[in-house]
Amino acid sequence: MAKLENIRNFAIIAHIDHGKSTLADRLIQDCGGLTNREMKQQVLDSMEIERERGITIKAQTVRLEYKADDGETYILNLMDTPGHVDFAYEVSRSLKACEGSLLVVDASQGVEAQTLANVYQAIDIDHEVVPVLNKIDLPAAEPERIRRQIEDVIGIDASEAIPVSAKTGVGVHEVLEALVTKLPAPKGDANKPLKAMLVDSWYDPYLGVVVLVRVMDGVMKKGMVMKMMATGAEHPIDRVGIFSPKKTPVESLGPGEIGFITAGIKEVADTNVGDTITEAKKPCAEALAGFKPSQSVVFCGLFPADAADFEHLRDSLHKLRLNDASFEFEAESSAALGFGFRCGFLGMLHLEIIQERLYREFNLDLITTSPSVVYKVHKTDGTLEELHNPADMPDPVRIAHIEEPWIEATIMLPDEHLGSVLKLCEDRRGIQKQLTYAGNRAMLIYELPLNEVVYDFYDRLKSVSRGYASFDYQLKEYRQGDLVKLSILVNAEPVDALAMLVHRSQAETRGRGLCERLKDLIPRQMFKIPIQAAIGGKVVARETISALRKDVTAKCYGGDVSRKRKLLEKQKAGKKRMRTYGKVEIPHDAFIAALKMNDS
Amino acid sequence: MTTQTKATNAPPLALYVHWPFCERKCPYCDFNSHVREQVDHDRWRRALLADMRHFARQTPNHILHSIFFGGGTPSLMHPRTVAALIEEAAKLWPTVNGLEITLEANPSSVEAARLAAYRSAGVNRVSLGVQALDDASLRFLGRLHTADEALRALEIARTTFDRLSFDLIYARPEQSLAQWREELTRALSFHAGHLSAYQLTIEQDTAFFRRHARGEFHLPDEDLAADLFALTEDLAGAQGLLPYEISNYAKPGAESRHNLAYWQAGHYVGIGPGAHGRLPLPEGAALATQQSKRPETWLDQVENKGHGSENTETVTADQRCEEAVMMGLRLTNGIDKALFAARLGRPLEQAINPQAMADLIDLGMLCDSPTHLATTPDGRLLLNSLTSRLLS
Ligand SMILES: Nc1nc2c(ncn2[C@@H]2O[C@H](COP(=O)(O)OP(=O)(O)O)[C@@H](O)[C@H]2O)c(=O)[nH]1
Ligand SMILES: C[S@@+](CC[C@H](N)C(=O)[O-])C[C@H]1O[C@@H](n2cnc3c(N)ncnc32)[C@H](O)[C@@H]1O
Ligand code: SF4
Ligand SMILES: [Mg+2]
């Protein structure tokens, strides 16, 4: 158990590619955390890849022992966190486990939007923030300008920002000294009942569920029966350890320490990030503040492209959930797409990760319906319904009004793209809150409805800014909106999988876009097919697929009748990938393409 | 010359003879045709005879209704070979009165000169590969003959044979309705009893396929192709050549009996490289035979094993029903329900999806009568969609 005053816990906040991994390597190396033989490049990154394969995006820690200039040996716990908005709550818990943050900014690039959101979170919980200007070895580095930018944009004192080159090692010693001298030691009392925060957890095939903890008060030991306060579940602790960065067993973890435990927990779903762990027979009086059960923000339907894969999809979702309790799923059926699952995610990135993993690890070819946010439908009878699926929308006459989630978005970009980004935000019903400049970079703060953002905002933003804009957001509140259900009818039959909730002002454009796309995607058939977009009974856009006139093969192949039959068999195999809609056959691919969000 | 037998209850049989050689490979053609400097006609004759005997042993009790010499270019065969094959067939099987014996001929002058000899050999119907009536189109199609040669060949054929058919390929690149009207009108003025008019089809593994993929030429779009098709039916019909199959037109009674065997789930023997056969098996199933495609391989095989079959597989009764629906609906009269039931051992209604049939009748694509199931004029052009629904 380490002495409290010699512990420093810190998080690293950085935009992608600003040098977090390289700097972490340097810190580990300088503290001798790994022998030279073990020290390969980018220790964090190699672990990231492993994590990516095993789980989604998890926090991780490394414990370093640093002999400081004052002669004392300090324990430095480096906390690495996923930097994406989808995991904002997880990030907030990781930050909560530390007393300070290193803010790493590329001195040739400057501050980006994602960095901002995380720094603000750190400041909000009173972190001591130590700014680091990295990559000063680069000729393009402008440490002075970036120092001012940090002060202007973030509003913290950067006069003592440390110029560093994680590449050459310049400034790394100064960083370690700053951690020791500027960051406060954690507080806590070893004699009080155990109070620890569950920072994160993941599934390890050998150890079962591994729980990352930060001890606040009391001591955690092997053999102790712990209790998770949110669920009341009790487990005897069977392993206590730290990451050096290898998993290393220790006797106990005391106040201020960060480490891991295992306790025969079967599923990650049994652990809740942010929960308080205490001792079953001597519990602490009250849990840590700020615990929130995870909540899905974006929903979509996942359907196997081949209906025969339904059971496989179910099993695969269960397997993924072993390790990622933050997504939920429930069986649903669609006339267009057959049997599948309605799934809830923390955000768009989370959705993409799960989709990608189902494809890569489970070999599943999926159809994803348009993502939907959670709407609050206030009905005329005074009741409130949460709507995850546009297909379930109650009859409009029974709806008093609908509320939709709004976000506050921060966008940073070079000013030459400002015009097109402003237009994009306006088109998406955005409300401008702030526009500031730092040098030639603009910072925009906009309020936007989340449903506009999940549609294709991020792709559009990347394309109008040629990839130079960075974007981040926070959920803000629910607001009433003039939302309508846009139905797509093929040959007068509504296609459930294509229904969506949109703002009335967008309905026509969105409907027209979909109709045009479907017109190109649905092959001509024996009769002409009207394609309509409608709000209730009112058609807002229409296209017609003209009838097929001729598909007969002119030539016949003499006695080679098998050739024709084999062609037919191929056609039949192709048909398996068709859905019959009324009398219309729609290829699966047409749905997939119609559902692709990046249109225009 | 042929042993004529009174019609009995014996099941009918058709005989196809494939001659795999051509003077030049046409760029659109994916038939089993090969260009060879030298062909040992005696060896080929002996081999074809041996292949024929092999199949005769497997089709006892059948009565021969037709013989068809196809290719390749059968008008490159020695008339002696044709004669020997016809003679042998008549020894091996009983034949019907007026056995139809067709030979495909290319309209070059040399070949036209041989037509009389084929008639002496027993051929009573000739099918000329005219393809087009203007030199530019013939060059595009890679043909060796000119329009004039084609006209002369037609003339000779008409005086030599009672039954004459010729082939045209239309819906060629840049072909307009007016141009086709003019060309077809001229073609119809020869008063042949039978015409095969095929829309140009781009087949995989042909020179045209590659050139078309590179965008060197474009085919008429679907609408123009449909209009060209309708025009063909109108013009031919006006001259008394009624469309009896998607691409075939005939005066009543002048239909190709041989091809009807393919379209009506008949049995047939196929000899020569790449030829296909359908031999009877119990309970509506059939044995599908395919001869080796490469001429040299086939020849060696016949000489060593006594037959040229590379592949024989059972086509189940279910599969034959599918074939019979696909092929039968190509006919204007459609599927003869009684014949279907007799040949496949089950009623037509059992072979097709009743819901699809009802829908297609509703849509005006199919027309059902107590004796026949047929396509309507609209439905005929959409036969691929139709069959894939009916057989789903
Ligand atoms: N020149 C220079 N390159 C650096 C420095 N630090 C990191 N890099 C490079 O910047 C890129 C991104 O670094 P990385 O540590 O992976 O960034 P991360 O995405 O924040 O983890 C890599 O190519 C590094 O080699 C530095 O101080 N100087
Ligand atoms: C077995 S082939 C050829 C017979 C003969 N060797 C000839 O070329 O005249 C029978 C007919 O099929 C037609 N044909 C062949 N390939 C075709 C294609 N790719 N598209 C349309 N018709 C084709 C031609 O009209 C040809 O005469
Ligand atoms: S079209 Fe006739 S002549 Fe031309 S290659 Fe084919 S079979 Fe031979
Ligand atoms: Mg990295």
Image: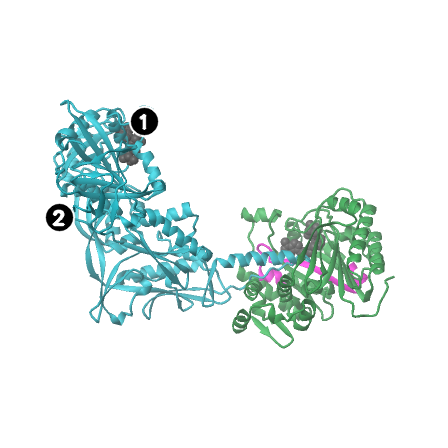
Image quadrant of ligand 2? bottom right
Indicate which disc residue A285 carries: 2
Q: How many marks?
A: 2
In the figure, the shade used to draw chain B is green
Residue at figure coordinates x 51%, y 59% from the top left: A575
Q: Residues within 10 Å of mark 2 (few under 14, many from 20)?
A: few
Q: Which residue is mark 1?
A: A39
Foreground residue, A41 or A72?
Answer: A72
Q: Position of residue B77 (x, y in %)?
A: 79, 51
Residue type, mark 1 in image: Met
Pick the residue in front: A77 or A509: A77
Disc 1 is placed on an element classified as loop
Chain A color in figure: cyan
The quarter holding residue A572 reads: bottom right
Residue extending farthest to the right is B1
- The mark lying in front, picked from 1 and 2, is 2
Pick whichever, A530 or A183, lies toward us.
A183
Q: Which residues are magenta?
A: B156-181
In the rendered image of this protein, does residue A129 appear above or below residue A316? above
Residue A78 horizontal/vertical position (percent): 22, 34
Q: Left or right: where does residue A207 sit relative to residue B4?
A: left
Horizontal arrangement in the rendering, residue A396 relative to residue A156 (left or right) = right
Residue A413 visible in the shown view:
no
Instruction: Say whether residue A486 is visible.
Output: yes
Label disc, if present, on residue B108 of the rendered structure: none
Residue A260: x %, y % from top left? 25, 38
Image quarter in which the N terminus of chain A is found:
top left
Query: Please, is residue A458 above or below residue A249 in the view?
Result: below
Residue B383 coordinates in the image, percent (x, y)? 58, 64
Disc 2 marks a residue whose amino acid type is Ala
Q: Is residue A109 left or right of residue B347?
A: left
